[in-house]
Image (spheres, rainbow, N blue to C red):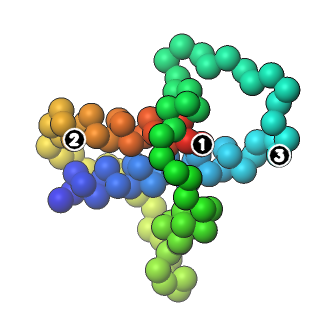
Amino acid sequence: MRASAGALAAVLVVVVTLMGAAAGRAQEPAATPPATPAGTTAPSGCTVEARPLSFLETLVRLPDPDVTPVPVESVPEGVPVDEATRAEITATVTMLIACA
């Protein structure tokens, strides 16, 4: 269960980071899109319908605004994930990057 919570937390960090990166982009598209560097994900890799920004805002919003977040001081040791789980997480993060 801890591995799943850790994986979810990692995915949420990526989503929030991508939201910030997307918000910082220019509003007008460039005349010539830049080439995709080797080892990165092209926008054509995004094969899912875009969710509205309100969906992501609701997803990352704290359920109780009176709760004070506690910073994570260290990441607990755990059992490494199996290859199928690693592949699914990698596919999810790759899709997030492609759709950003």
Q: Disc 3 versus disc 2: distance between alpha carbons?
A: 36 Å
**Which numbered disc flags the more N-terminal residue, 2 or 1?**
2
Please give the label number shown on residue 85: 2
User: In terms of depth relative to the viewer, which is nearer, 83 or 55?
Assistant: 55
Q: Residues within 10 Å of mark 1 (few under 14, many from 20)?
A: some
User: Would residue 3 be visible to someone looking at this image?
Assistant: yes
Residue 4 drawn at (x, y percent): 24, 54
Of the image marks 3 and 1, the number of the one nearer the N terminus: 3
The mark lying in front, picked from 3 and 2, is 3
Q: Position of residue 40 (x, y in %)?
A: 52, 23
Inspect the image, locate mark 1, and give the three-letter code of the amino acid beneath it: Ala
Amino acid type assigned to the residue bearing label 2 in the image: Thr
The residue depicted at 41 percent of the width and 49 percent of the height is 11
What amino acid is found at the position of numbered circle 3 in the picture?
Answer: Gln
> Crowding at label 2, few (<14), some or many (≥20) Cα neighbours within 10 Å?
few
Residue hosting label 3: 27
Q: What residue is pinned by disc 1?
A: 100
